[in-house]
Image: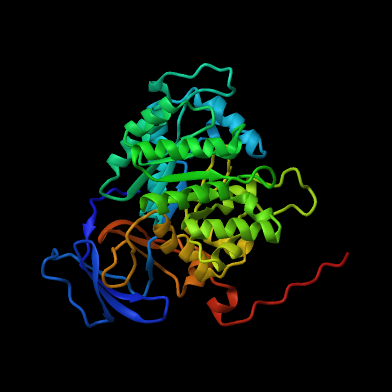
Amino acid sequence: MDATAPRTIGLLRSALLPDGRLVDVTIEDGTVTAVAPAGTLSAPTSTPADATLDLEGRLLLTAPAEPHAHLDKALSADAIRPPLGDLGAAIASWSAHAATMTVEDIADRARTAALALLAAGTTSVRSHVDVLSGRRSPADAPASAESATRGARALVQVREELAGLMDLELVALAGPLAPDAHVEAVLDCGVDLVGGAPHLAEDPLADVDRLLALAERYGVGVDLHTDESLDGPVTLDHYARAVSRLRRDRGDARQYSAGHCVRLGTLGPERLAEVVADVAAADLGIITLPITNLYLQGWQHPVSTPRGLTAIRALTDAGVRVAAGADNVRDPFNPVGRSDALETASLLVSAGHVTPDQAYAMVSDTARSVMGLPAAGPVPGRRADLLAMAATSVTDAVANAPADRIVLSRGRLVARTEVRRNIAAPERTRTGVPPRPQPVPVP
């Protein structure tokens, strides 16, 4: 992998749009300024002499955004060697390993994982980071605040290092046993949002209220792991109603979202309709995570194993913004993953029964909306966060996930992958003569 400085781009030539048009695209100050038929635009005079990039008919799309990552956990599977298993087994193996981690170790893995996302086209990432309080039961004494902030300090460092290449937003993942003081220490490191997993608490609804109160004190948004199981408590409606009150009583316009929401996919029609109505009324963004939840959920159901997905159709039909992310990558919660939004999109088509176009929107435009980011894409006035691929359509891109990619972040070329393929030709193609039939062996 070669490392080069980002290159400012003022003109993209011969870009193929999803609607079939071949166009030129001009960019100034990180924003798309014009889209016109190919061959009709020139690079703005304010851009450098080498600011033109010929896409040669590559498909041009809004760059993906990753709304739910765990960069502090990423790529730890080889060190942990976790057993295959469900959410409980994953939490246990991660908790044991977390006590041994250093800031440097976390930062190294997080940096590698973030750059893999960037190379695949993702220019904005929201990553949860554990509040490492060191408690596995209420009887355990908490670790020091310094120890609890190891992950946060590592990811803040990586965010600063990659600031010119990609946007990285951080969420304090506060387990039910993490003291408020530790969550506050993590937020004081420069973490952007409050997160947690209230469904794992002894009193799930009280933990939702605790986390919302923490966010209120700091004036930040909230992104919770919500109801990540096929049965058990439902906290999503309580969370949504609390957000509705904040919006109504205080004019609260902060970002609120919920990830996983697997339990929603197992509710009966009447209860499902009630919860979805609460979510829509709160304008709560929902983030489905097919790769990890298809892996973690259903181990106790060897026959007719249920899907580990939220109720995507019911939510979208109600006008809820549903984004999708990859979640974990090669750690105890998911042993695989390519750090590629097209992998997520492909699984949404197969397991979530959405179209390829809908799936790509969930990992790009809708993901950006749920993350509170400006709209991007090859449209005048939008941010020039763009992905160009050797594909003929969105369906082709989702199906084949071509490795040949060009990535722009705020109008700057930040990653390029070129693929050379050489396949031996069949004998008939090479010689023009049909291959000689071979004798059939006689038994």
Which quadrant holds residue 381?
bottom left
- Considering depth in this image, is 3 or 412 the residue closer to the camera? 412
In the image, farthest residue toward the front: 249
- Image coordinates of residue 333 in percent, x first then y, are 58, 40
Q: In this view, does 146 lie above or below 422?
A: above
Name the residue rendered at 58%, 43% in the picture.
334
Q: In this view, does 17 lie above or below 172?
A: below
Q: Is residue 143 above or below residue 196?
A: above
- Considering depth in this image, is 155 or 8 the residue closer to the camera? 155
Which quadrant holds residue 43?
bottom left
In the image, farthest residue toward the right: 443
Name the residue rendered at 38%, 76% in the picture.
17
Name the residue rendered at 49%, 22% in the picture.
100
Position of 303 with respect to 375 (left or right) is: right
Work out whether residue 422 can be spotted. no
- Considering depth in this image, is 112 or 128 the residue closer to the camera? 128
- Image coordinates of residue 229 in percent, x first then y, are 65, 45
Name the residue rendered at 44%, 28% in the picture.
180
- Image coordinates of residue 68 in percent, x first then y, are 47, 48
Q: Report the label total.
A: 0
Screen quadrant of the C terminus: bottom right
Which quadrant holds residue 146?
top left
Name the image colouring.
rainbow
- Image coordinates of residue 10 in percent, x first then y, are 20, 67
- Considering depth in this image, is 218 or 346 the residue closer to the camera? 218
Work out whether residue 58 can be spotted. yes
